[in-house]
Image (tube, rainbow, N blue to C red):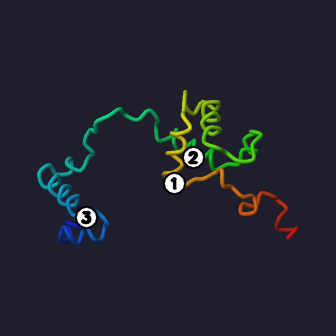
Amino acid sequence: MLHAARGRSNARIARETGLHLDTVRTWRDRFARQGIAGLTDRKRSGRPSSFTALQTAQVKALACRLPAETGTPLSRWSCPELAREAVTRNIADSLSASTVRRWLAEDAIKPWQHRSWIFITDPGFRPKA
């Protein structure tokens, strides 16, 4: 809408934002008919999300830590292990490995590919180097 307020055409807005031209038209039309209220998301079909954004963030944060830091006897996290750990920590009542996998894929988090030589964990590394 800010682009439209500057007098830009739908085609230019689509090009600059990477949106499809039809999407730009739809949103401009909704704004023209309903004002600011037209920019809110409409209700979607299907089951509402079972997890909050906080739960998702907590699982992602857990995935970014080494298992040893949490007292878990693993060298790397796997999605099933992360799901179990999240339930153990009461982040969620139940959580599937596929849900964890989907959440991590959103941000390209791959804890099973952690390499200790990339992430220096020795506090005395600089003096030794």
Residue at 19 percent of width and 71 percent of height: 8
Q: Secondary structure at mark 2?
A: helix
Q: Residue 113: where, in percent of width, then height?
A: 66, 55
Please report the residue visible at 32 percent of the width from the left and 34 percent of the height from the top.
46
What residue sits right under mark 1 in the picture? Answer: 107
| Mark before the other along the chain sequence, 2 or 3 | 3
Which of labels 2 and 3 is toward the front? 2
Residue at horizontal 85 percent and vertical 71 percent from the top: 129
User: Foreground: 129 or 23?
Assistant: 23
Q: Which mark is residue 60?
A: 2
Above-or-below relation of 75 to 83: below
Sequence-wise, which precedes: disc 1 or disc 3?
3
Contact, CB < 8 Å: mark 1 with mark 2? yes
Q: Earlier in the sequence, mark 1 or mark 2?
A: 2
Q: Amino acid at mark 1?
A: Asp
Q: Describe the element under mark 1 as helix, strand or loop.
A: loop
Which residue is drawn at the image coordinates 23% and 72% (left, top)? Answer: 12
Q: Residues within 10 Å of mark 1 (few under 14, many from 20)?
A: few
The Cα atoms of the two marked residues, 2 and 3, are separated by: 33 Å
Mark 2 residue type: Lys
Residue that carries the numbered disc 3 in the rendered image: 2
State the image coordinates of residue 80 (x, y, percent, origin top left): 62, 38
Which SS class for mark 3?
helix
- Is the residue marked by circle 3 packed among few (<14), some (14-19), or many (20+) residues within 10 Å? few
Above-or-below relation of 64 to 9: above
- Marks 1/2: CA–CA distance: 9 Å
Identity, as a three-letter code, of the amino acid under mark 3: Leu
Of tags 1 and 3, which is closer to the observer?
1
